[in-house]
Image: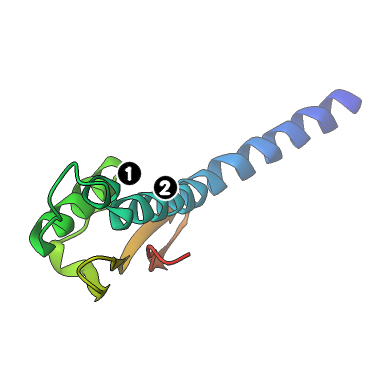
């Protein structure tokens, strides 16, 4: 009787982990993309004079490439870019708006994410 409960408990635990993994991986990818957006928006190389400031198109392509690393499919039109501040102290805001389809055993749903470079 004790072994049966142990095996049943382990099976339920394994099922719970297997079912929650797709959701957890989407959340983790979103957190990683948010960190990348902050790094891209900082434009540290341009601030210290090592590179010229990036154009809007370059920034959008960089964000799309970063998202692709985490298996997030984005189009450049999904990247929101706002420039404020002065020429000497520019402030760049980046945000992305996307949906991810999560498939669980017997059930699927869509998650909506809006990561941004804001702190």
Q: Position of residue 40 (x, y in %)?
A: 29, 52
Gap between marks 2 and 1, in whole Å? Answer: 8 Å
Residue under label 2, please give it. Answer: 32
Along the line of sight, which residue is nearer the eye, 104 or 90? 90
Mark 2 or mark 1, whichever is nearer to me: 2
Q: How is the image coloured?
A: rainbow
Q: Is residue 24 visible?
A: yes
Q: Position of residue 30 (x, y in %)?
A: 41, 54
Question: Label 2: how many residues lie within 10 Å, few (<14), some (14-19) or many (20+)?
Answer: some
Name the image quarter holding residue 11: top right
Q: Is 37 situated left or right of 27 in this image?
A: left
Q: Position of residue 80 (x, y in %)?
A: 24, 71
Q: Residue furthest right?
A: 2
Along the line of sight, which residue is nearer the eye, 52 or 105? 52
Residue name at image x 12 percent, y 51 percent: 52
Is label 2 in contact with label 1 (beta carbons under 8 Å)?
yes
Q: Secondary structure at mark 2?
A: helix
Q: Secondary structure at mark 1?
A: loop
Residue name at image x 76 percent, y 28 percent: 7
Residue under label 1, please give it. Answer: 70
Name the image quarter holding residue 57: bottom left
Q: Position of residue 116 (x, y in %)?
A: 38, 65
Q: Residue furthest top?
A: 3
Residue name at image x 32 percent, y 44 percent: 70
Residue 117, disc = none
Q: Is residue 105 visible?
A: no
Q: Quadrant of the N terminus?
A: top right
Q: Is 105 situated left or right of 57 in this image?
A: right
Residue name at image x 29 percent, y 45 percent: 71
Along the line of sight, which residue is nearer the eye, 72 or 65? 65
For marks 2 and 1 on the same chain, the one whose residue lies earlier in the sequence: 2
Question: Label 1: how many residues lie within 10 Å, few (<14), some (14-19) or many (20+)?
Answer: some
């Amino acid at each position: 009787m004790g072994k049966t409960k142990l095996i049943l408990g382990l099976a339920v635990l394994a099922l719970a982990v297997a079912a929650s993994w797709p959701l957890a991986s989407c959340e983790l990818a979103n957190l990683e993309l948010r960190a990348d957006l902050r790094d891209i928006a900082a434009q540290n190389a341009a601030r210290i004079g090592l590179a010229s400031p990036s154009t809007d198109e370059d920034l959008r392509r960089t964000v799309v490439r970063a998202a692709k690393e985490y298996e997030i499919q984005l189009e450049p039109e999904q990247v929101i870019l706002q420039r404020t501040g002065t020429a000497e102290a520019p402030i760049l805001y980046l945000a992305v708006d996307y949906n991810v389809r999560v498939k669980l055993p017997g059930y699927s749903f869509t998650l909506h994410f809006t990561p941004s470079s804001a702190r």
